[in-house]
């Protein structure tokens, strides 16, 4: 489905896939900044909602290893969304863009 929509948008001229390769620096910078913001929010939410799971006592370690097991916004699992959905689709589209370039 992703490939079909991407091909349709590219060939109709609505969104050229080569744009991703031309702007990979800013796109990856924004993706990293956004990922850090989401990580900080999830870490703070664990303490805010008192859903901390096995903290080690070392905040630095707890932040990177995770203390909130299943952070959710309604039915959206944030860990699944952040680790699989966005990153793999972005990688696929960047690879496709590099191939077209």
Image (tube, rainbow, N blue to C red):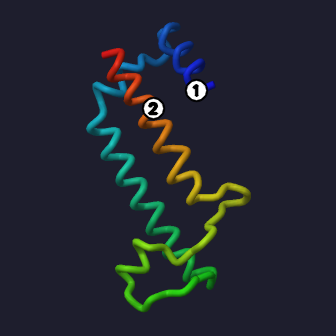
Helix, strand or loop at mark 1: helix
> Residue shown at 55%/83% (left/top)?
47
Whole-percent x, y for residue 15 in the image: 46, 18
Q: Is residue 39 above or below residue 12?
A: below
Whole-percent x, y for residue 42 in the image: 52, 69
Residue contact at pointers 2 and 1, CB within 8 angstroms = yes
Of residues 36 and 53, the one nearer the viewer is: 53
> Residue shown at 35%/46% (left/top)?
30
Q: CA distance from mark 2 to mark 1?
A: 9 Å
Point out the residue furthest to the top here: 12
> Residue shown at 59%/58% (left/top)?
78
Point out the residue furthest to the right here: 75
Tell me the residue that label 2 is attached to: 92
Q: Is residue 91 above or below residue 67?
A: above
Of residues 88 and 78, the one nearer the viewer is: 88
Tell me the residue that label 1 is attached to: 2
- Pointer 1 local density, CA inside 10 Å: few below 14, some 14–19, many at least 20: few
- Residue 63, by quadrant, is bottom left
Helix, strand or loop at mark 2: helix
- Pointer 2 local density, CA inside 10 Å: few below 14, some 14–19, many at least 20: few
> Residue shown at 58%/55% (left/top)?
80
């Amino acid at each position: 489905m992703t490939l079909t929509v991407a091909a349709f948008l590219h060939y109709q001229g609505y969104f050229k896939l080569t744009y991703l390769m031309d702007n990979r620096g800013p796109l990856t910078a924004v993706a990293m900044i956004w990922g850090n913001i989401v990580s900080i929010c999830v870490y703070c939410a664990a303490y805010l909602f008192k859903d901390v799971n096995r903290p080690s006592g070392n905040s630095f370690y707890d932040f990177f290893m995770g203390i909130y097991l299943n952070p959710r916004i309604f039915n959206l699992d944030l860990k699944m969304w952040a680790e699989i959905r966005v990153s793999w689709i972005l990688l696929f589209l960047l690879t496709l863009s590099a191939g077209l370039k």
